[in-house]
Image: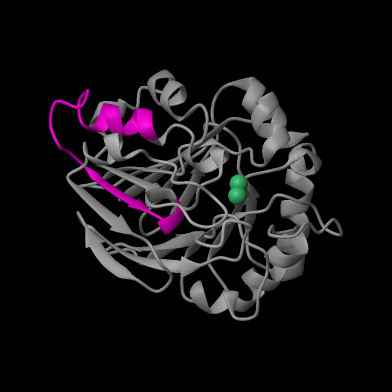
């Protein structure tokens, strides 16, 4: 079984700096892996808060160099290496994060990269196995030109995927064809396009083209915050694919079934039903 825990469901600058939604990324737990995906601001504190010991992490995945995806990566590297006492864990990250590019500077220092056992540079179409999961890097089109998404294959229960920040481009659906669960970073609602990002309309096209068993929308910008549930409904009506709007603290268990468990706290539930 794989478990996915949403430590954050906010995205973009304004949601991040106001923390109207958390921006801690997603923890993915399998038999062999304790993986943190896109540790934005709050990844460390919400891990501790949710009893997900950051020192147990053995892989950190970073899709690109924007702070809402990478901000807490260095402190998680310190946790993963048990306070830099040993070289431990794997970093899988875009070229921009590891080396920098013309637009973004390197976002994990050489000092921190020295604490890692292994570094994998993630570029589109690359495949590798880590622990008990197989990964394929997917393409994204975003203001950091090295941005990538990830597709994850379990041995027994098929695949799930995460788009990261991307605008719609010809052929994006092909990267996600055949996955059972598709997590899309949908910053903007229907009819409100923004370069480099996805709207609900783009999500509809991608879901129609890739036909997952279930879709989850997350990484909401300000305009999505109070209508994410309605936008998810709209996607579901357009595509026929069950679609949920993620909330902070939400957990998904992924095995024969894909089960969404909402957090008990009323505050979080409130943002789901509004
Ligand atoms: Zn983002
Ligand atoms: Zn971004």
What span is colored magenta in the figure?
74-96
Residue sitting farthest toward the right: 191
Of the 4 image quadrants, the one containing the C terminus is top right
Is 159 a magenta residue? no
Q: Residue furthest left?
A: 86
The image shows residue 103 at horizontal and vertical percentages of: 57, 54
Residue 88 position by quadrant: top left
- In the rendered structure, the answer to whether residue 263 lies left or right of residue 203 reads left
Query: Seen in the image, is 137 located left or right of residue 234?
Result: left
Position of residue 1 relative to residue 125, above or below, is: above
Task: Please give the name of the residue rendered at 25% of the width and 32% of the height, measured from the top-left corner.
Answer: 80
Q: Nearer the viewer, residue 118 or 177?
A: 118
Name the residue at 43% across, 70% down: 124
Compared to residue 141, the image places residue 120 above or below, namely: above
In the rendered structure, the answer to whether residue 268 lies left or right of residue 108 reads right
Residue 43 in which image quadrant: top left
Residue 181, image x, y percentages? 49, 61
Q: Nearer the viewer, residue 257 or 93?
A: 93
On the rendered structure, is 41 left or right of 187? Answer: left
């Amino acid at each position: 079984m794989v478990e996915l825990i949403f430590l954050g469901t906010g995205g973009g600058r304004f949601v991040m700096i106001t923390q109207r939604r958390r921006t801690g990324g997603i923890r993915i737990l399998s038999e062999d892996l304790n993986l943190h995906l896109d540790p934005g601001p709050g990844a460390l504190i919400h891990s501790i808060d949710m009893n997900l010991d950051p020192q147990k992490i053995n892989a950190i995945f970073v899709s690109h160099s924007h702070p809402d995806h990478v901000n807490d990566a260095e402190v998680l590297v310190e946790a993963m290496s048990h306070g830099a006492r040993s070289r431990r864990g794997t970093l899988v990250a875009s070229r921009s994060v590891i080396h920098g590019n013309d637009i973004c500077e390197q976002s994990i220092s050489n000092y921190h990269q020295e604490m890692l056992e292994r570094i994998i540079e993630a570029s589109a179409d690359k495949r590798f196995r880590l622990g008990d999961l197989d990964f394929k890097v997917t393409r994204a089109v975003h203001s950091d030109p090295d941005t990538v998404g990830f597709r994850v294959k379990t041995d027994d229960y098929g695949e799930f995927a995460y788009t990261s920040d991307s605008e719609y481009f010809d052929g994006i659906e092909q990267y996600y064809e055949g996955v059972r669960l598709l997590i899309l970073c949908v910053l903007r609602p229907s009819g409100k396009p923004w370069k480099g990002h996805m709207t609900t309309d783009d999500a509809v096209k991608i879901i129609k083209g890739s036909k997952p068993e279930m879709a989850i929308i997350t990484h909401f910008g300000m305009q999505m915050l109070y209508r994410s549930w309605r936008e998810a409904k709209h996607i579901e009506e357009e595509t026929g694919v069950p679609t949920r709007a993620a909330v902070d603290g939400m957990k998904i268990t992924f095995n024969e079934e894909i089960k969404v468990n909402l957090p008990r706290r009323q505050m979080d539930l409130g943002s789901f039903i509004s």
